[in-house]
Amino acid sequence: MKKVLVTGGTGLVGKALEAVIKEQSPADEQWYFAGSKDADLTNLAATQALFAREKPTHVIHLAAMVGGLFHNMNNNLDFLRNNLLINDNVLQTAHEQDCVKVVSCLSTCIFPDKTSYPIDETMVHNGPPHPSNYGYSYAKRLIDVQNHAYHDKYGRLYTSVIPCNIFGPYDNYKPEVSHVIPGMINRMHQLVTEKLDVPESEKVFTVFGSGKPLRQFVYSLDLAELMIWVLRNYESVEPIILSADEAQEVTIFEVAQAIAKAFNFKGKLVCDTSKADGQYKKTASNAKLRSLLPDYAFTDFETAIETSVKWYKENYDQARK
Ligand code: NDP
């Protein structure tokens, strides 16, 4: 019997995993989705108590301090310290409790700022990250270092996945911390629901920055399916990029257009170039994933945006907590 503990089980990816597992959990797997109410993972004793209680054999480690560009820029020290503590506590406790596999989450935004494209799994440590999120990036990079060290010293199969930008139901829509898609959905909702006496064709939606940066996105439910596949089938300590295909990369302006379409917004979209763009692009290659799972069909971007907007509207109060 496998007992799978999901840390960060109440977040965007955790909720997607829970939804997928509800549909297809085999009889020999039991899953437990832990949030910060179960244990503050920055605290070693609380982490140990959670593991002692749940006795996992496998861990999907998602818990992290996570935020968008502006939240990262203002809080690098907190992103560094909280994530270092969480990761060290989870990995060491998993080892002490004899967990046979841990799958942790890195991110494509932790790759070197100056790099060649497309990025691949071998490049994680090849140079400094973008200065906007160095705290988060170095903490995440050390997961890979630690995975190798647990393997070298104890033969552990503790590995990591590298998703690109994730979005979907249960995303974090709090304006001060949200990523680009939930941030735009939030602002678009506000625009279409305020000043109802103004005709929508006269309303203007502002895209922060030039709108030109390119981004790859992965729908949280697709990512959840891929992470479950990694847990069951991927037998290497080396990280694996879980990202949609390079051809599915979109500009920030195209993201705004998809969101406008999902809201059936009839007004104008303009770019505010006085706002920061962040990295121009961080195109990642999913060639390794494709070599192992050539036929996986990612959800179409516009369809996934539509579903996310629908969830947001139906769960407005919960979404903004
Ligand atoms: P969310 O912000 O949606 O959720 C974070 C989760 O971590 C929540 O379940 C939260 O618990 C938990 N958590 C945070 N701090 C603590 C703590 N001190 N102790 C215990 N639990 C804690 O994150 P996502 O689902 O978006 O991200 C999942 C993983 O994917 C993360 O590791 C992230 O770095 C990575 N990632 C995310 C990307 C994205 O675009 N969102 C892109 C690439 C990688 P609670 O809510 O109960 O407080």
Image (cartoon, rainbow, N blue to C red):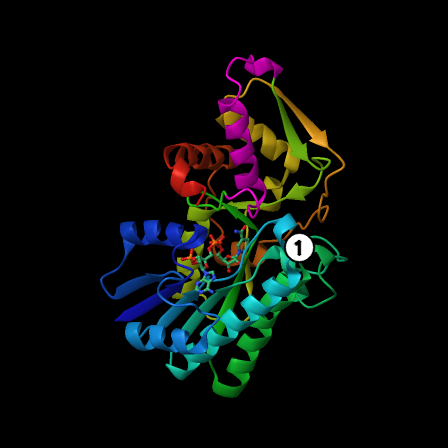
Residue topped by disc 1 = 74
In the image, residue 253 sits, relative to residue 81, either above or below, namely above
Asked whether the viewer can see residue 121, the reply is no
Q: Is mark 1 within 8 Å of ligand 1?
A: no
In the image, residue 54 sits, relative to residue 114, either above or below, namely below
Asked whether the viewer can see residue 317, the reply is yes
Task: Choose between 8 and 243: the one closer to the eye.
Answer: 8
- Asked if the stretch drawn in magenta spans residue 185, the answer is yes
Q: In terms of secondary structure, where does tag 1 sit? A: helix
Left or right? Give the position of 2 relative to 293. left
| Corner quadrant of residue 135 | bottom right
Quarter the C terminus occupies: top left
| Residue 90 position in % (x across, y down) | 45, 73
Task: Name the residue type under label 1.
Answer: Asn
| Corner quadrant of residue 57 | bottom left
In the image, residue 185 sits, relative to residue 47, either above or below, namely above
Name the residue: 40% across, 62% down.
36
| Residue 40 position in % (x across, y down) | 43, 67
Task: Choose between 26 and 89: the one closer to the eye.
Answer: 89
| Residue 257 position in % (x across, y down) | 59, 28
Which stretch appears magenta? Answer: 174-202
| Corner quadrant of residue 286 | bottom right
| Residue 291 position in % (x across, y down) | 53, 57
Name the residue: 77% across, 57% down.
114
In the image, residue 24 sits, relative to residue 32, either above or below, namely above
Left or right? Give the position of 261 relative to 225. right
| Mark 1 surroundings within 10 Å by alpha-carbon count, few (fewer than 14), some (14 through 19), many (20 or more) | few
Name the residue: 56% across, 39% down.
183
